[in-house]
Amino acid sequence: MIAKPGETGFDTATRVFNSVAIPEPAAATTARTVEQVRSALRYATEHGLRVRMHSTGHGAGAVRPVRDALLIRTALDGAVTVDPTTRTARIPAGTRWETVVKAAEPHGLTAAHGSSGSVGVVGYTLGGGLSPYGRLTGLASNTVRAVELVTADGRHRRVDTESDPDLFWALRGGGGGFGVVTAVEIDLFPVSRVITGAAYWPGALADRLLSTWLDWARDAPAIATTSVRVMNFPDVPDVPEALAGRTTFTVDGVVHADDIGAARLCADDLLGPLRALGTPLLDTWQEDAPAAVLRAHMDPEGPLPIVGDHLLLDEFDARASASFLDVLGEGSGSPLVGAGLRQLGGAYAAPPSPGGVLDRLDARYSYAGSGLAADPEAAESLRSHCTKVRHALAPWNTGRVVPSFVEDGTRRQGHLDTRQAVAVARVRAAVDPEGLFRDDISPTDLRQE
């Protein structure tokens, strides 16, 4: 049912994770079947509205304002279907990663999921996707084997390398604007045990911890994907007592190998030198089942008012580390609850086979930082500090981003070069000649050269 503001179903359809970026469309609907998607597209055409879409709404802060449009929330009926023989899963749009991990785990399989189980599969995956397994698997978009979508003409298509290679190429990282995705089919990979968790040290040790981690990360094996963060946890009941109300430096991630013995050696090589610098305030690193990976990063449940930023960075040197801690470390006055670096390289830089338009990252680290905007003054303080961080890290900023990680779509940033963007635009023009979905294109799809 199509709902307008104030009508039943509107609030449900427009609900997002980031409450700073609640959309305000002319109308909204929650689509649970392909026919409901088709009906929504007919409504939009008849009423002269552009079409926008989301599922869980985790990327709300990164998109263009949703006005004078019909917003479709995709929550397609049906369960996740796992085929253990082909090691694939078919996932209806609107499904969250926690559901996929639970469905795959009994078969000794998992996916290149994100760090939070509450994130939706489709937006994360087609937007690139940085997984805790990413240095081993590459971008999550490279694991997509087929996409099901309803295009502007009302056709429900299953697109893969055989049926429509150009559209399939553009869908994987192209920035949207092709149609309403109703399901994806992805590769799974075998895993029964992992070593995962997070260790938190006092913020005063950040300079030595960061230097030690960077030394390890430069030549780390691809079986390990880790991140470091400076955390300023609020003093609230949900935060562990050892971390509440103080600045900490965190190292978290996953080590996964076919041989658990090799994983243990790698984890010891990572954590041993760090633990030698000081006893962690809290240390959850342990051997566990794959589902534990979703808890390691301690991502919060929403909705929350969030303001943040994201960059892809080149190699860090001592000057870069000092700049990073000057604006984010203890005593910097940073209002960000969390800010850190994710380790790239490995299959992120050199995927085993070509994928979509965005299939690799020419960067060494992904930066992301965000804070809670309790009121407009706090939001402005956070935006100002994000700009300060951008200036501090400018010498190492590649200018590129991963779309599914972008927090602020108004910044000067992009994920495609001009040649790629032009090629993707040709595909869009072929599949949506009237531009029904043109407002749904990611603002980072064309890099500002």
Image (spheres, rainbow, N blue to C red):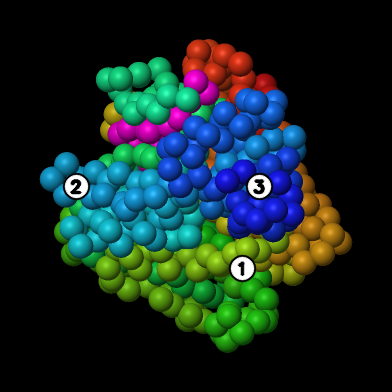
User: Percent x, y for residue 74?
Assistant: 50, 45
**For the residue labelled by badge 2, is the local secondary structure a helix, a strand or a loop?**
strand
Mark sitting earlier along the chain (1/3): 3
Mark sitting earlier along the chain (2/1): 2
Mark 3 = which residue? 3
Mark sitting earlier along the chain (2/3): 3
In the image, farthest residue toward the right: 377
Q: Are marks 1 and 3 in contact (CB under 8 Å)?
A: no
The amino acid pointed to by label 3 is Ala
Which segment did they paint magenta?
138-153
Q: Tell me what residue is drawn at x 86 percent, y 61 percent.
A: 377
State yes or no: residue 150 in magenta.
yes
Q: Is residue 300 left or right of residue 309?
A: left
The amino acid pointed to by label 2 is Asp
**For the residue labelled by badge 1, is the local secondary structure a helix, a strand or a loop?**
strand
User: Percent x, y for residue 171?
Assistant: 45, 28
Nearer to us of marks 2 and 1 is 2
Mark 1 = which residue? 231
Image quarter of residue 313: top right
